[in-house]
Image (cartoon, rainbow, N blue to C red):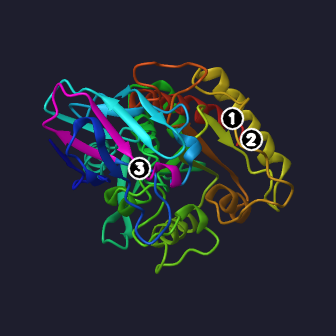
Amino acid sequence: MHINSNFDSGNIIVKSSKKAGDIQLEIRIDNGSHFYQWFHYRLTGAKGQACAMKIINAGKAAYTRGFKDYSVCVSYDREHWFRVPTEFDGEVLTINHTPDKDSVYYAYFAPYSMERHADMVAGISESPLVEQEVLGQTLDGQDLDLLIIGNTKSRLKFWVTARQHPGETMAEWWIEGFLERLVDEHDPVAKKLLGEATFYVIPNINPDGSKRGHLRTNAKGVNLNREWNKASMENSPEVYLCLEAMTKYGMDFHFDVHGDEALPYNFLIGIEGIPKLTQKMTDQYEFLVDKMVEISPDFQKERGYPKDKPSGADLSIASNYIANHFGIFSTTLEMPFKDNANLPDPDQGWSPERCIRLGRAFVDGFWSLSKIL
């Protein structure tokens, strides 16, 4: 029996693996920070054995509420991910599983590796509608990819950013579905949308954290979604380069894609607390929320985060800073690590396939939004 995480987006420390029924593990902390919760590892040689894998430092993870009513993601082929029984006693997260095959992968959520990112960017860039630009390099020397989609002379400029927090892999699954539909030249909604808006998409704004297997930070241990009002090439080149490009190209709307550890729902976050809030921004937010409720049963508006008090927004957060600085409507999508409680799937929970479908559904939402911008 062997456990390994020495691969793209892998994260686990093996403390003891002598007995299948008492495997003891720890999650590695994000480099240079105190955050941890993401894990991703491979187990081999345990076919037919009842394994109890105990993550013994789970009780001090970043968001322990995320482990309540949570089930781990498992895959044999790294394509189809399903859930297996998982218990959390407040200190230890125990994964109970008897593998059917010699090799099996476990992860906090279905991983989206940098290799898959490279394949996705290369595939999408084959479309004549797409231009690819490298904004610069990260601290680990990886490229920061920007995809420009559509006619740059369109009247609107829409920006979409994803995966500031690398462990929130559902964000890039969403991007995959969104982009595939957006460049479908046979899709009438996508064609009409691109007639109105040019899209500037950064599919993964935190490549270093993604490859390193971090939950929330970049290579230096910096939380990018707390850097927007103080970005620097020393600490957060990803945000700095993104803001340079936003200023260069201009923008009329910004959409940031994330995942939430605790809440089992899909929802948008408002910008009620920014100092320069306008009624127009509020109306656009409410319009998009109501439209997405109509479009997708996987989306809802009853559950989400508490609203910020007037002028009480944290301007280091992307959607708040961008809305306040550029004077446009900006919002954040949150998706669950667990399942959509309003439409549960006992086998897979919230899954890559459902992220992809929701990404495709937002093409309809953005088409509707474009008509009122």
Q: N-terminal of the two: label 3 or label 2?
A: 3
Per the rendered image, the range of residues in magenta is 40-60
Residue 326 to residue 119: above or below? below
Residue type marked 1: Leu
Q: Residue at x 56, y 29 (%)?
A: 364
The label shown at residue 56 is: 3
Residue type marked 2: Gln
Pointer 2 residue: 284
Q: Quadrant of the N terminus?
A: top left
Q: Are marks 1 and 3 in contact (CB under 8 Å)?
A: no
Q: Secondary structure at mark 2?
A: helix
Pointer 1 residue: 288
Of the pair 90 and 218, the residue shown nearer to us: 90
Q: Residues within 10 Å of mark 3 (few under 14, many from 20)?
A: some
Q: Secondary structure at mark 1?
A: helix
Q: Are marks 2 and 1 in contact (CB under 8 Å)?
A: yes
Residue 346 to residue 14: above or below? above
Q: CA distance from mark 3 to mark 2?
A: 45 Å
